[in-house]
Amino acid sequence: MTLLAPHRRSLRIPDFDYSDPNHVFFVTVKARRGGGKGPFSDPDLCKTIVQSLHHLRDSKGVRIYCYCLMPDHLHVLLSPSERSGGLVDVVHSFKSYTTRASWSLGRLGTLWSRSFYDRVIRDEEDFQTTCQYILGNPVRAGLVEHPDDYPYAALADFLPS
């Protein structure tokens, strides 16, 4: 008897244009499960991941509005660009690059979970609320008292007009 893997339900909205640079997405990517404090407790790895976000901006024109790398996940508010491909391409490229970079720091295996979660930002109020949520995450988690004290979170690009 052969057991088939259950069909994975798509997390994306059918027929939605995830490559439109006019859309802003709230993306959450979880780390693969591991023991200890979480894979992102290594400052060198955290710096590499943050630098990779900036590399997406510089090399592919992705707008990174804000981000926060927590000990076991990443939140980022972004828009793809004309040359970056769609949201799935951007996240896949980021995950592949950072996983390979983690190997050079002595980590083994895959860094990120297979899928990611996204939500389309609907308006300016949603944008502001989501950015505050992202930047406030380390405070809510008890990692710092003030958002500005957390080294792996920042506003990056200008707010959309």
Image (cartoon, rainbow, N blue to C red):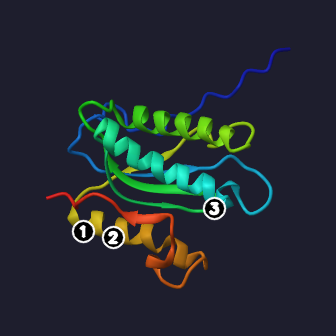
Are the residues at dot 2 and dot 1 in contact (C-beta closer than 8 Å)? yes
Q: Which mark is residue 68?
A: none
Q: Residue at x 25, y 46 (%)?
A: 23
Label 2: state its secondary structure.
Answer: helix
Instruction: Identify the residue position indicated by label 3 in the image.
Output: 71
Q: Which mark is residue 125?
A: 1
The x, y position of residue 139, in whole percent, is 53, 78
Name the kind of residue labelled 1 in the image: Glu
Whichever of callouts 3 and 1 sits on the residue coming sooner in the sequence is 3
Total marks drawn?
3
Classify mark 2: residues with Cα within 10 Å, few (<14), some (14-19) or many (20+). Answer: few
Q: Residue at x 74, y 63 (%)?
A: 37
Q: Which mark is residue 129?
A: 2
Name the kind of residue labelled 3 in the image: Pro
Name the kind of residue labelled 2 in the image: Thr
* C-alpha distance separating marks 2 and 3: 22 Å
> Which is nearer the eye, 40 or 43?
43
Classify mark 1: residues with Cα within 10 Å, few (<14), some (14-19) or many (20+). Answer: few
- Viewer-nearest of discs 3 and 1: 3
* C-alpha distance separating marks 3 and 1: 28 Å
Rendered view: 18 above or below 31: above
